[in-house]
Image (cartoon, helix red, strand yellow):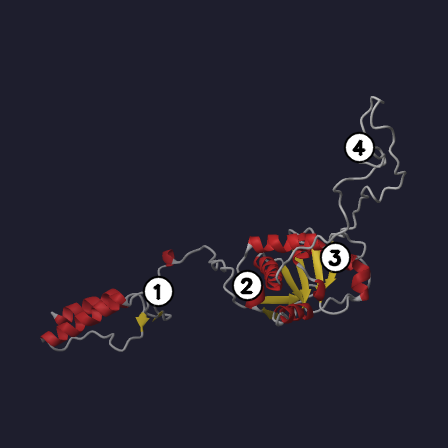
Amino acid sequence: MAASISARIFRTFGSLGRCSSPNLSANTSGNGLSSLTSDLKYGMALLSNRKLSTCILTPDDTFPSDLLTKKTVLTPDRTIGQYQDLVIPVTNFQSEEKGFMVLAGDVFDVPIRKDIIHNVVRWQLAKRQQGTHSTKTLSEVSGTGRKPWNQKGTGRARHGTLRGPQFRGGCVMHGPKPRSHAIKMNKQVRRLGLKIALTARAAEGKLLVFDDLALPTHKTKNIVNYYNQMENTKKVLVVEGGPIDEKLKLATQNLHYVNIIPSIGLNVYSILLHDTLVMSRDAVNKIVERMNTPINR
């Protein structure tokens, strides 16, 4: 009986391939209870670990062709915000492969927070307002200070001055005065907003890393030819790590859909205005260093 059970188990699981296991053999010797117990234990263990076993198909084994899928196997989408380092290919304007670069997960893979982006953009737009609008009060309007007519007896409304807001050329009551429109925003929140913007572009596949931003000539066609090869792109923001190359500056100054900015000036609003972000290796390193610099209290 032990031999028949062991042979049945071997026929069931051995047909899938030759599995490397120290006890995979048909125990045909012995008819005792111990042999039956060992075979049953091995059969249950093989059932429980069937999904975890590693089977190797040798050339003489025939795998059913109808079980092979004809569809392309796609890897599952990456979960954003896990602080995992990203590996991205490095190219240049000539579409030449220059290797790969690892993007820091604490900068390019943070959780997406729309409220943080909204607050940072609101802070940027408010801070850049000039606040130079001004109106004149009653004391600032030039003109006479005498009473225009008598208080009574004229049949007209009583007035004490012609420089009031109800008269043409008079003052403006409670009008705007020069002031700062800036609102308070913590440095940690501002830094987090930039990380979220970079994470969003990296997750969309709209973050490109170049080995360098050098161009052979200053001709605009160099940028136009590369722009025409890009898919689903309307505006491009080029980020340079150090001083902007003069040839690159001349090649893009007549293109309204290509803008250049140094890494020190990279901000959330500029990233959101452009759907594609092109950064050099030096710019990526400068941004990571900037994000990891201790905040001065």
Residue type of the residue flagged with mark 3: Asn
- In the rendered view, tell whether residue 185 sits above or below residue 158: below
Q: Which residue is mark 4?
A: 166
Q: Which mark is residue 62?
A: 1
- Residue 280 visible in image: yes
Residue 3 falls in which quadrant of the image? bottom left
Dot placed on the residue nearer the N-terminal end, 1 or 2: 1
Give the residue furthest to the left. 32
- Which of discs 2 and 4 lies nearer the camera? The answer is 4
- Residue 86 visible in image: no
Q: Find out whether the residues at labels 1 and 2 contact each other: C-beta distance under 8 Å.
A: no
In the image shown, does 70 or 89 lie closer to the viewer?
Answer: 89
Helix or strand or loop: what does disc 4 sit on?
loop
Q: Residue at x 75, y 45 (%)?
A: 176
Q: Residues within 10 Å of mark 4 (few under 14, many from 20)?
A: few
Residue 155 falls in which quadrant of the image? top right
Q: Which mark is residue 109?
A: 2
Q: Residues within 10 Å of mark 2 (few under 14, many from 20)?
A: many
Q: Find out whether the residues at labels 3 and 2 contact each other: C-beta distance under 8 Å.
A: no
In the image shown, does 245 or 71 lie closer to the viewer?
Answer: 245
Residue type of the residue flagged with mark 4: Gln
Helix or strand or loop: what does disc 3 sit on?
strand
| Residue 121 image point, x, y percent | 65, 53
Dot placed on the residue nearer the N-terminal end, 3 or 1: 1
Q: Which residue is mark 3?
A: 259
| Residue 17 image point, x, y percent | 32, 68
Q: Is residue 272 left or right of residue 154?
A: left
Q: Measure how far apart labels 3 and 4 are at the Cα level.
A: 49 Å
Give the residue furthest to the front. 152
Helix or strand or loop: what does disc 1 sit on?
loop
Residue type of the residue flagged with mark 2: Asp
